[in-house]
Image (cartoon, grey):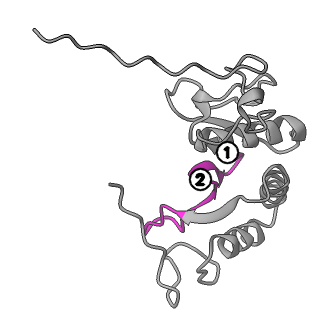
């Protein structure tokens, strides 16, 4: 079982973090955007808005707090969907299960050799394909919810893709056992 990493004490700032102490993931992301104050903050805010437009049920979290790091912005719905990290020359959106996602628009441009994650590095001046990013977000959420019906499945047996129109699956016949 994974251990959760505690968020820094609400009355003590995390070493190396210039902002005020925050308790919620949303407040942490707000503070991070404000602290950056440059194109990276604006880009993180834009990506955040796209993520919420794609799935209004996304939960913002703060994970992986260490003495050397204030933590990482995380967007979750039934599990981690993606993270929003900022570096000197890029905003990196890392999809936790990105290798399992279809990317027909070719947004993934980083961490391509990994077996699990995939990332999108956004540099100053880059444009975001909002529709394609929304599709990736929705696909990542769907991947976290494998028991949810797929799009277009209304939930009735007649509409299920494995069912013939108007026919239901036949029940398996019980096996006969003969005494030996």
The image quarter containing residue 41 is bottom right
Tell me where residue 31 appears, x and y as whole percent: 71, 74
Q: Residue furthest bottom?
A: 11
- Specify the segment rendered in magenta: 63-91
Can residue 129 be seen here? The reply is no
The vertical placement of 177 against 142, above or below, is: above
Q: Residue furthest left?
A: 180
Query: Image point 58% across, 80% down: which residue?
Result: 23
Which numbered circle lies on residue 78?
Answer: 2
Tell me where residue 170 appears, x and y as whole percent: 57, 19
Q: Is residue 78 magenta?
A: yes
Residue 32 left/right relative to 46: left
Tell me where residue 143 appears, x and y as whole percent: 62, 38
Q: Split into 4 quadrants, where in the image is the C terminus?
A: top left
Q: Residues within 10 Å of mark 2 (few under 14, many from 20)?
A: some
Query: Image point 57% across, 74% down: which residue?
Result: 17
Q: Is residue 133 magenta?
A: no
The vertical placement of 159 against 142, above or below, is: above
Asked if the residues shown at circle 2 and circle 1 are in contact, with their CB atoms under 8 angstroms apart, the answer is: yes
**Residue bearing the label numbered 1:** 141
Q: Residues within 10 Å of mark 1 (few under 14, many from 20)?
A: many
- State the CA–CA distance, disc 2 to disc 1: 7 Å
Can residue 178 be seen here? The reply is yes
Q: Indicate the secondary structure of the residue bearing disc 2.
A: loop
Which numbered circle lies on residue 149?
Answer: none
Query: Image point 61% across, 34% down: which residue?
Result: 98
Q: Indicate the secondary structure of the residue bearing disc 1.
A: helix
The vertical placement of 131 against 22, above or below, is: above
């Amino acid at each position: 079982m994974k251990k959760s990493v505690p968020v820094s004490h609400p009355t003590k700032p995390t070493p190396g973090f210039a902002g005020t102490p925050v308790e919620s993931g949303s407040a942490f992301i707000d503070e991070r955007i404000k602290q950056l104050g440059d194109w990276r903050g604006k880009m993180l805010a834009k990506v955040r808005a796209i993520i919420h437009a794609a799935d209004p049920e996304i939960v913002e979290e703060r994970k992986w707090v260490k003495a050397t790091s204030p933590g990482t912005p995380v967007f979750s719905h039934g599990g981690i969907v993606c993270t929003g990290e900022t570096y000197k020359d890029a905003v990196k959106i890392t999809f936790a299960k990105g290798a399992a996602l279809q990317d027909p628009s070719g947004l993934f441009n980083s961490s391509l050799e990994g077996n699990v994650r995939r990332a999108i590095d956004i540099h100053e001046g880059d444009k975001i394909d909002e529709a394609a990013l929304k599709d990736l977000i929705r696909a990542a959420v769907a991947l976290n919810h494998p028991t949810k019906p797929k799009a277009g499945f209304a939930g009735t047996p007649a509409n299920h893709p494995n069912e013939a129109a108007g026919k239901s699956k036949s029940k398996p016949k019980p096996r006969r056992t003969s005494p030996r």
